[in-house]
Amino acid sequence: MKQSEFLNVVMPFKDKLYRLAKRLLVSKEEAEDATQEILLKLWSKNESMGEYKNVEAFAMTMTKNFCLDRLKSKQASNLKLVHSNYEDEKTSLQKQLEAEDSVRWMERIMEELPEQQKMVLQLRDVEQYEFEEICELLDMKPTAVRVTLSRARKAVRQELIKKHNYGIG
């Protein structure tokens, strides 16, 4: 596979790889490093790329495995929480602070979920993958994916209700 073909195949889903890495690793820098590492690994396999039925699914699986390995490694203790700040000059400072607080709160809630729930919620609700694709990526049965997603959504909903009823605790 030539470089131009590789770019045409891989670049359309590069951002999805990054978002998955960021969801798992939290740190923007770590996610960027992980994405770069996966792209390098994909390039090293470019000769055999045509053999894969779904290159995107293969790349997402590689990203998931790489990030989980990274979290398990000794370097995981060095990971730091880095949150993106979204700036919009038209919004008031109050609205900007509320938006940043909401993003941080959702990230905190999602970080507390079990690993599998976090992955299924990220793939389905953030990345908009179909159930069949999630089953393939995570090697799960459709019923298990639906149950896991339901539990993850319920846990997030309960935490949001707590926050709104009792304030941030």
Image (cartoon, rainbow, N blue to C red):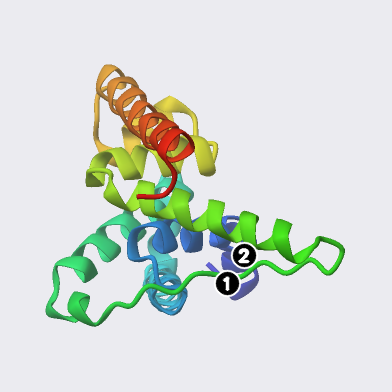
Can you give x and y, in whole percent of width and height, for residue 88 in the image? 79, 66
Q: Which amino acid does label 2 sit on?
A: Glu
Q: For mark 2, what is the residue?
A: 5
Q: Which residue lies furthest to the front in this view?
A: 166
In the image, residue 124 sits, relative to residue 62, either above or below, namely above
Q: For mark 1, what is the residue?
A: 2
Question: Which element type, helix, strand or loop, lies under badge 1?
Answer: loop
Locate residue 29 relative to residue 8 in the image: left or right.
left
Give me the residue at 25% from left, 23% from top. 144
Can you give x and y, in whole percent of width and height, for residue 133 in the image? 42, 33
Q: Residue 80 appears in which quarter of the rendering?
A: bottom left
Q: How many marks?
A: 2
Tell me whether the residue at label 2 lies in contact with that at label 1, contact meaning CB atoms closer than 8 angstroms. Answer: yes
Locate residue 55 relative to residue 77 in the image: left or right.
right
Q: Residue 24 appears in which quarter of the rendering?
A: bottom left
Q: Which of 168 and 88 is in front in this view?
A: 168
Locate residue 11 relative to residue 126 in the image: left or right.
right
Q: What residue type is labelled 1?
A: Lys
Q: Nearer the viewer, residue 88 or 137?
A: 88
